[in-house]
Image: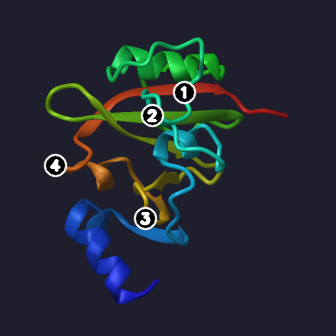
Amino acid sequence: MSSEEQKLIEEIFPGLQSTGYDITSPATKEYNCIAWAAEDTEAWWWPNKDCFWPSEVPQEENIDVFIKVYEALGYSLCDSNSYEEGVEKVAIYVDSEGIPTHAARQLSNGRWTSKLGKSEDIEHNTLDGLVSTEYGTVAVIMKRLKKK
């Protein structure tokens, strides 16, 4: 990772410096964090007419709607971000007003992966590394059995 990329990421997400992360792909505008957490690298997901959004879910920016998006993918609410063998997890972040801002997906190695807007994908050791004024805090954790 270049020191410029690293510096910019750490300015926005200072918690990553102490919790650890790696850049895992180059920047792209093809998809965002909501899509990345849903394992889609072909579309930008957001509840507005210019982006992809599942047709069965209302186009509203609130946590209940974002929960419905991941429920449509087989996830259900859970109370732990700890790694569980055979389980996939996603975390949804919200800002101070409760508006969703970001989603991260847990990997089979226990780390988390995030797409940083139009920037890079990263692997990070904890969800706390992205808690910031940009993304807010983790509001919910969801899980589903891993696909076979």
- C-alpha gap between disc 2 and disc 3: 16 Å
Q: Residue 133 carries which label?
A: 4
The residue pinned by badge 3 equals 119
Q: Residue 53 carries which label?
A: 1
Task: Characterize the local packing of mark 2: few (<14), some (14-19) or many (20 or more) Cα atoms within 10 angstroms.
Answer: some
The residue pinned by badge 2 equals 46
Query: Does dot 1 land on a helix, a strand or a loop?
Result: loop
Q: Tell me the amino acid under the disc marked 3.
A: Ser
Query: Residue 93, located in which quarter of the rendered image?
Result: top left
Give the label, 1 or 3, closer to the camera. 1
Q: Can residue 78 be seen in this view?
A: no
Q: Is residue 129 visible?
A: yes
Q: Earlier in the sequence, mark 2 or mark 4?
A: 2
Task: Characterize the local packing of mark 4: few (<14), some (14-19) or many (20 or more) Cα atoms within 10 angstroms.
Answer: few
Q: Are marks 2 and 1 in contact (CB under 8 Å)?
A: yes
- C-alpha gap between disc 4 and disc 3: 17 Å
Horizontal side, residue 87 vs residue 122: left or right: right
Please report the residue visible at 66 percent of the width from the left and 20 percent of the height from the top. Answer: 74
User: Residue 124: percent from the left, percent from the top?
Assistant: 44, 59
Query: Does dot 2 land on a helix, a strand or a loop?
Result: loop
Q: Do the residues labelled 2 and 4 touch (CB within 8 Å)?
A: no
User: Residue 43: percent from the left, percent from the top?
Assistant: 60, 44
User: Between 8 and 56, which is closer to the camera in this rendering?
Assistant: 56
Q: Tell me the amino acid under the disc marked 2.
A: Trp
Q: Which mark is residue 141?
A: none
